[in-house]
Image (cartoon, rainbow, N blue to C red):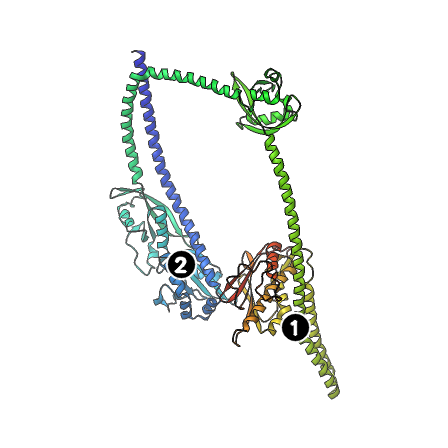
Amino acid sequence: MSVTRQTTLGVVLIVLLAIFMFTALSVIHVNRDLAFAIEYKHNKIDQMLALQSEEFERALRSRFRALLSDYYLREVMASKDKERIRLYFNEKYSALVGEYHTEVVVHIHDENGRSFMRMHAPGHLNYMGYPRPMIKEVAEQKEPRFGFDLGCYGLFYRYAEPVFYMGVFVGVAEIGIGVDYLLSRMKNTLDLEMGLFIPAEKAETLCFEPRAESLDGERLLNVSNDEFIHIFNKADFSKGVAKEVEEDGRIYRVHMGHYLKGYNGQKIATLVTFQDITYEKDAIGHFLKLAVIMALLLMGVTVLLMKNSFMRIISDLEKKYKESKSRENYLGEIIANSLNEIFIYDIDTLRFVEVNRGACENLGYTHSEILQMTTLDIKPKMTYSMLRAHMMPVLQGEKATVIFETVHRRKDGTLYPVEIHIQKTSLLGQDVMMAVVLDITQRKDVENRLKALNDALEKKVEQETERRLFSEKIMMEQKKFIDMGQMINAVAHQWRQPLNALGLYVQDMRETHYSQGLDDVYVNQIESDCMHIINHMSDTIDDFRRFFAPDKSAEPFEIIVSVIETIRLVSAQLTSSSINYRIICRCGEQTFLSENSVESPDCIKHKTLVDGYEGEFKQVLLNIIHNSRDAIVERKLTESDDFQGFIEFELDAGGENILLIIKDNGGGIPEKVIQKIFDPYFTTKEEGKGTGIGLYMSKNIIEQHMKGSLSAESKDGCAVFRLVLKHAVVRNGG
């Protein structure tokens, strides 16, 4: 056999082997893709079940928390008035049904967990029933429960929460979303047919008859659509779990092992899904047919090429090799004439092996002079060990290139900054280092100018900041004098009635002395009453002194105590203006209510503790209270005689942060100015009656000094201020 035939046969065999390997690897790859797609869908089902459960829990918790925060709802639940509850939920229930487009459950239970109001089943208005285990746990533990739960009307994701009125447990409120919504979301997202099965014994408790289809003793409850029924009837589950099902020319992969869990974490339903893998199966068969056809075509083309063009290929390869060598010479000439400095030096001795023209011209040495030198001769600020340290990552293969900056010294002794890029290469079979050097004199000049500009800008910013802080300090001092005048007026109101009472006691003592004589009982009573009045006046002075006492440092203090002490100072002014005030304090599951009284509730034991400057915080409260009082007094001039002003202080310390809401019915804040009320020197009052810095300084104190937030809104004719502050850490076990 000739050499040409042997070569041709060898090439043909190589091509056939390559085609076979390509086909085999491609089939394996397609099968792996199919397996990956199946595994991906399987994992995605679990992920989406968990995600939807979390989304249900967040959405329903958020909705019920908003509803249960309504004082009116808790009141009507306490009254056990079913008709009022139905009217309250009627519009909200319709909105939920319209939003989710599925069955929605709104269910009210009494304090024993028994049902007494169902929005989703008006015909069962008077049905008491027995408490489900989930509701029974909520009623007993007084804690929320959430999860999938099977009721009379089917499987729902339910959220149930205890309801308290005036600190007393009055019942359980429950909301639920039908499982059809979950199946619809999963089908649209994952493109799967799916059905939900429940144990046969649980199906007997339903108020309707589930589908007849069964799976290992379980009954079919819900499906994504009727297509699931057709596929399910084709599957044979009698001999274990079927992996693939064929129906109407389509092939489906069966996914098992997915469950819906109840509120207690136990399995409550089984999810079965069918994944359409027809396309992937067909692709494998088509690919095998295509591979055979391509193999035959390639064999013919290969033989033809080998017969007519084998020598031409060899000739072309030789020509390309010569062209590549010519290209290397061409590139070498470009590098040699480059204006950038390029050095090649020995790895161990650091002596130059070769340099280009740009290096010679920039350094001022001749080519032969540089070849007698080492790279350290032109680097006055580097030592052998320093340069080796830069080279080690390249020599050890950790990096392909290392970049660093230093200075080079010319033949005339002048220095200039450079950026050096070093890498390992080979020259004539020997490993060497190549350095490409960039002159960065201009870049350094720009950096130095930029640094000087930044330094000047920073200094200017510091000066402007100092001026602003000084200006704010002056504003604070001005505001303190204004507040002091208001507080002196408040103290005058607080003292006017006690002083009048003391005067009456003195006059009564004189008349009694002349008419009846003074006995020990009368004198003791007079002394006790007068001392009580004097102590009250002394407490007022102490509150006034503490209000303006300078805070030396930020320390923990009780918000509720500060609120009470501030209200105590202005309570007489509020009373004289016929303004009622109410304090609501929520600590955990307890609620404390005080109306027109400044007695301290029992919730102040470190539950409303924050860090900050208590004096500054009281100034914030005083600013808001005076603004509310002025607004109510002004509104009274235009309202009827029976108008009653009020200011409400609602403190909630049960969450992650402490929330204080101050609300008044002075008419609210106009929409056109609500975005400006915290701006400095902005006021809606007449000239001479307002400075416009009270709310500005209040926002600065809360957000800058106490790291909280202060915002305002207008709602239903009321101005509402929200203060959010972080809980302070209780120290020393206090």
Is 222 or 466 nearer to us in this picture?
Answer: 466
Is 642 or 605 nearer to us in this picture?
Answer: 642
**Residue situated furthest bottom in the rendering:** 515
Q: Secondary structure at mark 1?
A: helix
Q: Please, is residue 317 above or below residue 114 in the view?
A: above
Location of residue 402 by image quarter: top right
Left or right: 130, with 539 as reference point: left
Q: Secondary structure at mark 2?
A: strand
In this rendering, which labeled residue sits more in front, label 2 or label 1? Answer: 1
Label 1 Cα neighbours within 10 Å, binned few <14 / some 14-19 / many ≥20: some
Label 2 Cα neighbours within 10 Å, binned few <14 / some 14-19 / many ≥20: many
Marks 2 and 1 sit apart, C-alpha to C-alpha, by: 55 Å
The circle on residue 493 is 1
Determine whether label 2 and label 1 are within 8 Å by CB: no
The residue at 28%/30% (across/down) is: 290
Residue linked to disc 2 = 176
Q: Quadrant of the C terminus?
A: bottom right
Q: Position of residue 50 (x, y in %)?
A: 42, 49
Q: Quadrant of the N terminus?
A: top left
Left or right: 524, with 105 as reference point: right
Is 629 or 227 nearer to us in this picture?
Answer: 629
Q: Position of residue 81 (x, y in %)?
A: 43, 71
Q: Please, is residue 398 above or below residue 703 in the view?
A: above
Residue 476 appears in view: yes
Location of residue 432 by image quarter: top right
Location of residue 448 by image quarter: top right
The residue at 68%/78% (across/down) is: 501
> Looking at the image, is mark 2 or mark 1 earlier in the sequence?
2
Left or right: 350, with 502 as reference point: left
Q: Position of residue 397 (x, y in %)?
A: 53, 26
